[in-house]
Amino acid sequence: MRMWCALSGVSPGPVPFRRLTAERLAHAIRRTIDNPGYGTSARRHVRLIAAEDGAGRVTAAVQRLC
């Protein structure tokens, strides 16, 4: 999930846990806040996900299996 966020343009990328410090986390948060492109990308993905009928697709797959 963390890499998906970076690859899809909604975050600057993960901070590896072994290298996590307050300063690195603050820097990642600041990069996210300062880059309006992340918010734009996130809103686009929200619209795409909201338009999906995930429950309907799962129901149809279960019905095919029965």
Image (cartoon, rainbow, N blue to C red):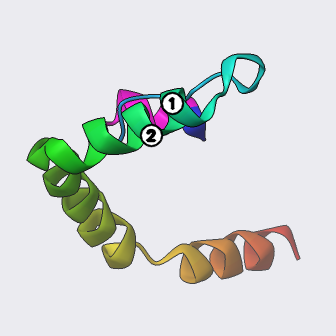
- What residue is shown with label 2? 26
Q: Is residue 37 left or right of residue 5?
A: left
| Gap in angstroms between the C-alphas marked 2 and 1 | 5 Å
Say which of 22 and 43 sits in front: 22
* In the image, residue 29 above or below residue 46: above
Q: Residue at x 44, y 40 (%)?
A: 26
Q: Residue furthest front?
A: 23
Q: Residue furthest right?
A: 66
The region drawn magenta spans 3-9
Q: Quadrant of residue 32?
A: top left
Q: Residue at x 31, y 68 (%)?
A: 46
Let me know if residue 4 is in the magenta part: yes
Amino acid, disc 2 = Ala
Residue 64, how many percent across, how many down? 75, 71
Say which of 4 and 19 sits in front: 19
Local packing at callout 1 (Cα closer than 10 Å; few below 14, some 14-19, many 20+) is: few
Residue 10, how many percent across, how many down? 32, 44
Residue 11, how many percent across, how many down? 36, 39
Q: Quadrant of residue 55?
A: bottom right
- What residue is shown with label 1? 23
Q: Residue at x 52, y 36 (%)?
A: 25
Amino acid, disc 1 = Glu
Q: Main secondary structure of the magenta part?
A: helix
Q: Residue at x 59, y 36 (%)?
A: 22
* In the image, residue 3 above or below residue 47: above
Local packing at callout 2 (Cα closer than 10 Å; few below 14, some 14-19, many 20+) is: few
Q: Quadrant of residue 1?
A: top right
Q: Is residue 26 left or right of residue 63?
A: left
CB under 8 Å between discs 2 and 1: yes
Indicate the secondary structure of the residue bearing disc 1.
Answer: helix
Please identify the quadrant where the C terminus is shown. Answer: bottom right
